[in-house]
Amino acid sequence: MYVIFDFDGVIVDSEKSIFKYFQKELKIYENIDISDMDFSKKVGYSSEDFLRQVTFLSEDKINYWAHKRREVFLNNVSYYEIIPGVVEQIKRLSLKYELAICSNSYIKFMIPVLKHYDVYQYFKYIFGMENTTKPKPDPEIYLIGKSKFEGSGFVIEDSVAGVLSAKKAGLTVVAITTSFLRSELNAADYIIDSFVELEGIIE
């Protein structure tokens, strides 16, 4: 058996930082107001898809801002706050299972963060936007991850899009409520409020 982690909202809490970055920068430089109510449109979606939903920017502008945001975050890993309890669970699970990451983030941005929090070495595979043409909720990224392992596997997700992606790929999903309410994650097989609860599901 194996366990696949999402990255944003599961290993690190970067969604809020990304959202606030766009709120601030687009107000200053594009005179665009992004409402706090739009936060749910970011969780589980790429920066490009988020900007397409909440702005009328051209594709060139969207790509510019998405790239600029990634460069800013790459040069300052402090934007990424570790989710409480996840490091302990990664270490625990690695003793018994093979681990991977499947994320809508780019690998080159995930690796420095994983190394910063000293968990990079526990993951056999890391898949990101470099590996797929169809981000979540499409199942492609999880089908790629699944193909690397034998037997059954668990996915740990935090977003509606991520849960749908993993379920479409035929995987058992544990959703953690770091980004969405339980009622919004009811497509998952299990729902937890903290990583301590994971021990009762994946032993």
Image (tube, rainbow, N blue to C red):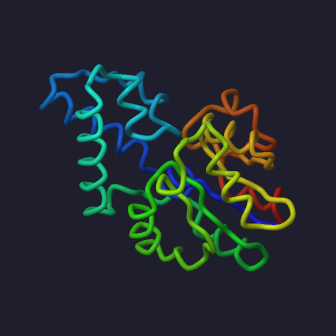
Compared with 58, 138 (above or below) is below
Residue 122 in picture, x, y percent from top left: 61, 76
Residue 89 in picture, x, y percent from top left: 66, 67
- Please give the name of the residue rendered at 62% of the width and 50% of the height, measured from the top-left corner: 141
- Please give the name of the residue rendered at 49% of the width and 38% of the height, measured from the top-left corner: 45
Q: Indicate the quadrant containing the N terminus: top left, top right, bottom left or bottom right.
A: bottom right
| 101 and 19: which is toward the camera | 101
How many labels sit on residues?
Answer: 0
Left or right relative to 130: residue 200: right
Q: Indicate the quadrant containing the C terminus: top left, top right, bottom left or bottom right.
A: bottom right
Residue extending farthest to the front is 133
Residue 48 in picture, x, y percent from top left: 38, 37
Left or right relative to 12: residue 23: left
Compared with 49, 99 (above or below) is below
Compared with 121, 64 (above or below) is above
Residue 76 in picture, x, y percent from top left: 27, 62
